[in-house]
Image (tube, rainbow, N blue to C red):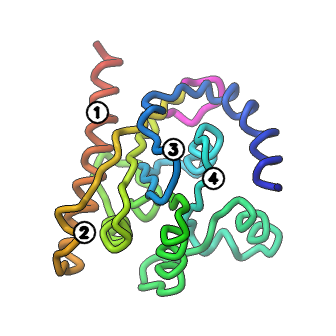
Amino acid sequence: MLYTISKFILAPIIKVLYKIKTVGMENIPEKGPYILCANHRNAMDPVLIGVVYPHKVSCIAKAELFNNKLAAWYLGKMGAFPVKRGEPDMKSIKNSLKILNEGKILGIFPEGTRNISDDIKAEPGIAMFAIKSKVPVVPAAIISEYKMFKKTKIIIGAPIILEEYYDMKLQNEDYYNVSYDIMNKINQTIKDESNEADN
């Protein structure tokens, strides 16, 4: 209920303030389970995704955001759950797999933290979750200056299905390489969009 009320109130305001345009909404599956994967340059990214996305997305968020009890309560109602960065977090892994096993949508920013450079970064978790749960990955490219009344564009790509890996025994490096390839596709979408804007 709180999620629906928050979105009803905030979505129109955020869409106007950040002049959000979405492309590729037809690529969004009708239902879960699947993973929504996006680049991460600003703290506003989860909000921008949340206001345009038609389904509730359970996002992985850094554990520090949950230090405040009120913030932790509200984030939990929004579907977010914490992950400890820089170390194996079995609770977060179990939560992620549980969400997918329940047929829901898991939101991940695979770069692990905000990345304001052009370097491609990726944590292995997204590939591991997708392959172990045998679910598609829906890539989203967020292109924004993160300034009010400046255009923001969100491009939703076609689902990526990793079925060629489903029956393979993979190492952490393999998961990393697959995750890197996914982020490379998102990064290429951003570059293509920037080149088109310059022409």
First reached walking from the N terminus: tag 3 or tag 1: 3
Task: Between label 2 and label 4, give the one nearer the viewer.
Answer: 4
SS for callout 1: helix
Residue position marked by numbered label 4 in the rendering: 56
Check the picture and name the quadrant holding the C terminus.
top left
Residue type beneath disc 4: Lys
Q: Do the residues labelled 3 and 1 touch (CB within 8 Å)?
A: no
Residue position marked by numbered label 2 in the rendering: 176
Residue position marked by numbered label 1 in the rendering: 191
First reached walking from the N terminus: tag 4 or tag 1: 4
Residue type beneath disc 3: Glu
Task: Between label 3 and label 1, give the one nearer the viewer.
Answer: 3
Q: Distance between the residues labelled 4 and 1?
A: 28 Å
Q: Which residue is at the front of the view, 182 or 138?
A: 138
Q: Position of residue 17 (x, y in %)?
A: 69, 28
Task: Between label 4 and label 1, give the one nearer the viewer.
Answer: 4
Residue 34 falls in image quadrant: bottom left
Q: How far apart are marks 1 and 2 (CA)?
A: 22 Å
Q: Answer few, some or many: residues within 10 Å of disc 1's Cα (few below 14, many 20 plus, some between 14 and 19).
A: some
Q: How far apart are marks 3 and 1 (CA)?
A: 28 Å
Q: Where is residue 15 in the image (x, y as percent from the top left)?
A: 66, 30
